[in-house]
Amino acid sequence: MLTVAVLISGTGSNLRALLDAAAEPGFPARVVVVGADRQADGFAHAEAFGIPTVMVPFREFETREQWGEELRRQIDVWTPDLIVLSGLMRLLPDALVDAWAPALINTHPAYLPEFPGAHGVRDALAAGVSQTGASVIVVDTGVDSGPILAQERIDVLPGDTEHTLHERIKPVERRLLIEVVRGIAAGEIDLSAYAPAIPSADVAEATETPDAAAVASDIA
Ligand code: GAR
């Protein structure tokens, strides 16, 4: 049985879908802890399933690195096999990505690499595209730049608002997330194939990534 930690910031509707799926007989994964960077509404879903929650308030730490160290300490207590970022609106510090990758995945409401960052839905609408999508990726130290595990296209309809479009994307995200978690648990997706070859600290020395800072500007 694959054990999963889920990190959220908001309503946790994708978390809820994963909890519902994991409660089905035969589902090969179970959520062992839900964490957040704030008092997230989505904790209610964890509590409904009797799953422990940990809250590590980002704003109470002087640096992202210190917050990341405490988040790691509190999540690692539960020794999860997989960590799912499901609407966590904070960038993890590189040291934490290095510690958890490649068993660290993220859902995103766009067809990556299109529209990364905090406003994937809004940015797609602003760009006037006729299709956007949903993606599940392995997290790397960039912003929504890791290897893609699953993705699907979704039409943008005339009159769509950020809300209506996001509400059509979310059910697809949920389905993809559940498929990916099931695939990892069943051994059909081998995350070890995505292990970073070089620690991010060494990569940072060798490469400049100015664009990452630009797209990340709203994921505080
Ligand atoms: C989801 O659409 C998720 O992909 C997105 O936040 C939403 C969370 O919804 N995450 C990002 O945009 C991260 N860049 P939820 O809290 O209802 O599950």
Image (spheres, helix red, strand yellow):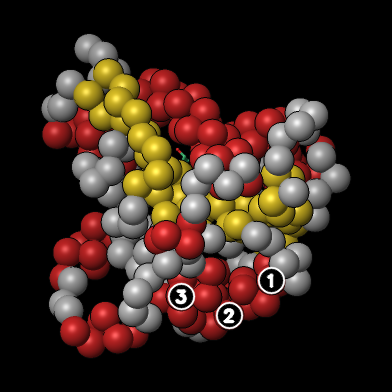
Mark 1 element type: helix
Name which residue lies at 53% across and 43% down. 188
Camera-nearest label, 1 or 2:
1
| Whether residue 70 is visible | yes
Looking at the image, residue 29 sits to the left or right of residue 154; the answer is right
Tag 2 near tag 3, CB within 8 Å: no
* Image quarter (top left, top right, bottom left or bottom right) of the C terminus: bottom left
Secondary structure of residue under mark 3: helix
Q: Which numbered mark, 2 or 3, is in the foreground of this view?
A: 3
Residue 89: give x, y in percent of width and height.
46, 55
The picture quadrant where one finds residue 128 is top left
Q: Is residue 29 above or below residue 199?
A: above
Distance from the alpha carbon under mark 3 to that under mark 1: 14 Å
Residue 88, percent from left and from top = 51, 53
| Residue 107 x, y percent position in the rendering | 45, 44
Crowdedness near tag 3: few (<14), some (14–19) or many (≥20) residues, C-alpha within 10 Å: many
Gap between marks 1 and 2 measured at Cα = 10 Å
Judged from this view, the residue extending furthest toward the top is 158
Residue underneath mark 3: 98
Q: Which residue is mark 2?
A: 69
